[in-house]
Image: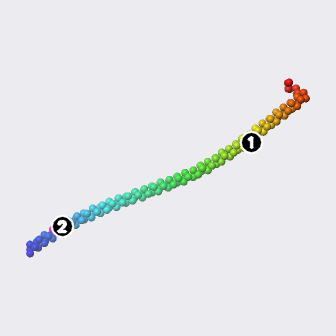
């Protein structure tokens, strides 16, 4: 019975040693897991911080680009308005110029008609005078 007690104590001691060894290993594993968890948490916080900074940067850039786009749209609208005004001026001047050219053509035609009438009248008058053998002194026969 002593021998059995001895074997049982021996088995108990071996079981306790194995228990302590296993407990020590598990505690080491838990410590390692906590360290890895802390590293992962730190990395997640860092990633979240970088993500927040990136979002802030992109938001600022988006606002700047939106502002530039609005400014360019206003400038484009102003240029379109100015272009329309210039086109209207050109069309007005073109119309005015066309009217002047038309008026000039009418005057040219009128001068031509009046010149023809004057020449016709002079010729008629000269023929009339010749028929009476009356010539002004400045005409030579």
> Going 76% across and 38% down the picture, which residue do you hit?
109
Q: What is the total number of numbered labels drawn onto the structure image?
A: 2
Mark in the foreground, 1 or 2? 1
Look at the image and tell me in which quarter the C terminus lies: top right
- Write down the region rendered in magenta: 13-19
Q: CA distance from mark 1 to mark 2?
A: 123 Å
Crowding near the residue tagged with mark 2, few <14, some 14–19, many ≥20 C-alpha atoms within 10 Å: few
Q: Which of the pair 92/55 is nearer the observer?
A: 92
Look at the image and tell me in which quarter the N terminus lies: bottom left
The disc at residue 103 is: 1
Question: Relative to residue 72, is residue 116 drawn left or right?
Answer: right
Question: Relative to residue 113, is residue 23 drawn left or right?
Answer: left
Q: Residue furthest right?
A: 132
- Predominant secondary structure, magenta span: helix
Question: Relative to residue 55, is residue 83 drawn left or right?
Answer: right
Residue carrying label 2 = 18
Question: Relative to residue 71, is residue 35 drawn left or right?
Answer: left
Q: Position of residue 115 (x, y in %)?
A: 80, 35
> Going 47% across and 54% down the picture, which residue do you hit?
61
Q: Is residue 95 magenta?
A: no
Q: Position of residue 123 (x, y in %)?
A: 84, 31
In this rendering, is residue 91 above or below 141?
below
Residue contact at pointers 1 and 2, CB within 8 angstroms: no
Q: Which type of secondary structure does the marked residue at label 2 adopt?
A: helix
Q: Position of residue 107 (x, y in %)?
A: 76, 39
The disc at residue 137 is: none
> Going 47% across and 56% down the picture, which residue do you hit?
59
> Going 78% across and 36% down the picture, which residue do you hit?
112
In this rendering, is residue 60 above or below 103?
below
């Amino acid at each position: 019975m002593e021998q059995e007690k001895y074997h049982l104590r021996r088995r108990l001691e071996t079981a306790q040693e194995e228990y302590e060894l296993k407990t020590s290993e598990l505690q080491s594993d838990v410590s390692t897991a906590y360290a890895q968890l802390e590293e992962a948490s730190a990395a997640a916080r860092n990633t979240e911080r970088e993500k927040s900074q990136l979002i802030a940067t992109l938001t600022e850039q988006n606002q700047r680009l939106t502002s530039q786009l609005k400014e360019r749209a206003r400038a484009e609208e102003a240029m379109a308005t100015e272009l329309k005004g210039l086109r209207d001026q050109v069309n007005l001047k073109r119309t005015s110029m066309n009217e002047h050219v038309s008026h000039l053509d009418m005057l040219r035609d009128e001068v031509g008609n009046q010149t023809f009438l004057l020449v016709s009248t002079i010729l008629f008058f000269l023929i009339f005078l010749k028929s009476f053998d009356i010539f002004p002194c400045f005409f030579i026969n």
